[in-house]
């Protein structure tokens, strides 16, 4: 992308407002599929799986209505961010791109110049159209799905944002933590070690205090994406405000006092208490396996349910790749990796991409223009150890400037022709793992492989590496202009 284009992108902001405004825009793009009559019991999750698995980043968002046993208008939304264009829409970026890494470059540029805006408290909003307390509380009034055939329970929180408050500094974090339903008044909240919500909870529990939470189950997709992103200790509300160019309107939760988006579809307030645990899981997770299936975890006692009329429950049924989670976490993680490479002074980074079949940051490719000996290795080690790449990574690959980091065919070609297994591998041991990894090691560690698939620097410097068979940029441009119908 040209520098002038990047500057133009910085002036853009998120154009829609709230989930319903987002759906209107997605419908105009022709990327919304409406389905009536699918059952909450595995059918909605299976339909999403089947439409997404071979979509190559073009699967539709799916709005389910007419769910048997539930009122018309009580809807579920799947696959919000399973296309690159919808992710661009959500972030306020241009919808057209030449390479997949363009969206990461634009997102990275926006985040680098971002000025966070704190949320704006308002007195009322659509989320207060229905306030449910006491004996009337029942989270199963919504068509909460059982996503996969081997799941043992229904999960209300998958494409969600869990709001927690740091007891020391008072800042609010939003994290995408799954929430299993035990009964109408009790839900789970699985939070991995090291995540901000887990750090908050550990602080409260160490003091013998309960932790209040809000589980947003139908929020602006921008908040869901940010909740799924590896971000520093800055509230996702503040970042979303900066991306939108105006503060997020929030109301105070009746039980928690926490900020809740005024236009949120469903918000569940509650608290989790030290020593109160129940078996949680299994759930078909984002790596495509039933790993870390069932163990005792703290749960949430529901105190208040807020919801709009005709509410939309947002869902993300992680499954064997390719799926929505791999794409949205991959783009968010790639942007943060690029940020770390820049912060460490790694020059000439031309692209970062997390490949969808290796969900999130399991297969990261960095594209550089080599400038000095060790440049490639430096990029590899920063990328695998920084905040954006540290959690649950496995493969990190660096390629030259003529290899598109987002094109797996090109990356594999480089790995097969510019890589020597004896000298171009580094291993990192005892790295931060996820228990969703079927091969995680005791203590929740894993090992990483770093692949230098760049032309050896001395051969590049001396111009002794064999030339590539390719079509020059000038000829490509000439032929595209001459035969526009061939290359539309």
Image: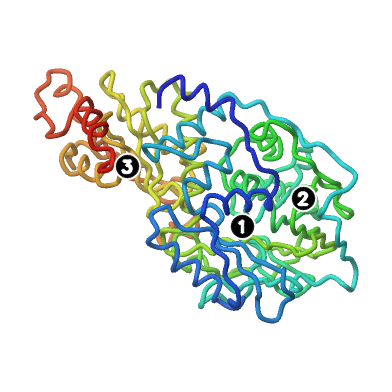
Check disc 3 and report its element: helix, strand or loop.
Answer: loop
Q: Which of the colour schemes (rainbow, by chain, secondary structure, one colour) is used?
A: rainbow
Residue in the foreground of this view, choosing between 476 and 115: 476
Which residue corresponds to the image point at 9% horizontal and 30% vertical from the top-left? 466
Which residue corresponds to the image point at 55% horizontal and 76% vertical from the top-left? 42
Q: Nearer the viewer, mark 3 or mark 2?
A: 3
The residue labelled by disc 3 is 488
Query: Circle 3: is it few (<14), some (14-19), or many (20+) Cα within 10 Å?
Result: few
**Gap between marks 1 and 2 measured at Cα:** 16 Å
Residue 338 in picture, x, y percent from top left: 45, 31
**Gap between marks 1 and 3 measured at Cα:** 35 Å
Circle 3/circle 2 CB separation < 8 Å? no
Q: Nearer the viewer, mark 1 or mark 3?
A: 3
Quadrant in the rendering for residue 139: bottom right
Circle 1/circle 3 CB separation < 8 Å? no
Residue 173 in picture, x, y percent from top left: 70, 43
**Gap between marks 3 and 2 measured at Cα:** 40 Å
Residue 159 numbered mark, or none? 1
Residue 37 in picture, x, y percent from top left: 60, 77
The residue labelled by disc 2 is 263
The N terminus: image quadrant = top left
């Amino acid at each position: 992308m040209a520098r002038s284009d990047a500057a133009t992108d910085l002036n853009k902001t998120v154009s829609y407002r709230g989930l319903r405004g987002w759906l209107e825009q997605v419908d105009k793009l022709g990327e919304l599929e409406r389905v009536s009559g699918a059952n909450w019991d595995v059918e909605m999750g299976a339909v999403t799986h089947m439409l997404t698995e071979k979509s190559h980043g073009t699967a539709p968002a799916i709005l389910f209505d007419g769910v048997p046993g539930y009122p018309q208008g009580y809807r579920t939304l799947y696959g919000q961010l399973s296309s690159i264009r919808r992710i661009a829409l959500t972030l306020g970026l241009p919808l057209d791109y030449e390479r997949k890494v363009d969206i990461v470059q634009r997102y990275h540029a926006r985040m680098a110049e971002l000025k966070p805006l704190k949320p704006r408290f308002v007195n009322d909003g659509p989320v207060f159209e229905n306030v449910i307390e006491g004996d009337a509380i029942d989270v199963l009034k919504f068509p909460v799905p059982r996503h996969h055939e081997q799941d043992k329970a229904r999960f209300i929180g998958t494409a969600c944002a869990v709001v927690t408050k740091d007891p020391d500094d008072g800042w609010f974090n939003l994290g995408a933590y799954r929430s299993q339903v035990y009964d109408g008044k009790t839900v789970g909240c699985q939070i991995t070690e090291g995540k901000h919500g887990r750090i908050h909870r550990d602080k409260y529990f160490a003091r013998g205090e309960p932790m209040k939470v809000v589980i947003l189950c139908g929020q602006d997709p921008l908040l869901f994406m940010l909740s799924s992103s590896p971000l520093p200790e800055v509230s996702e509300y503040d970042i979303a405000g900066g991306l939108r160019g105006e503060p997020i309107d929030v109301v105070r939760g009746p039980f928690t006092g926490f900020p809740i988006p005024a236009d949120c579809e469903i918000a569940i307030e509650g608290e989790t208490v030290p020593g109160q645990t129940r078996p949680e899981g299994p759930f078909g997770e984002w790596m495509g396996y039933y790993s870390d299936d069932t163990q005792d975890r703290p749960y949430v006692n529901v105190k208040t349910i807020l919801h709009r009329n005709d509410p939309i429950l947002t869902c993300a049924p992680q499954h064997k790749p390719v799926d929505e989670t791999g794409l949205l976490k991959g783009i968010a993680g790639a942007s943060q990796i690029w940020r770390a490479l820049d912060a460490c002074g790694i020059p000439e980074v031309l692209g970062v991409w997390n490949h969808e079949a290796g969900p999130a940051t399991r297969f990261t490719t960095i594209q550089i223009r080599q400038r000095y000996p060790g440049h490639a290795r430096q990029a590899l080690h920063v990328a695998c150890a920084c905040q954006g790449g540290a959690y649950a990574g496995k493969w990190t690959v660096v390629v030259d400037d003529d290899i598109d980091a987002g094109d797996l065919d090109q990356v594999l070609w480089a790995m097969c022709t510019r890589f020597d297994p004896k000298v171009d591998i580094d291993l990192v041991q005892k790295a931060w793992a996820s228990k969703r990894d079927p091969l995680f090691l005791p203590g929740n560690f894993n090992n990483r492989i770093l692949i230098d698939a760049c032309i050896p620097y001395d051969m590049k410097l001396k111009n002794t590496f064999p030339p590539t068979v390719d079509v020059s940029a000038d000829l490509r441009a000439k032929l595209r202009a001459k035969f526009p119908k061939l290359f539309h």
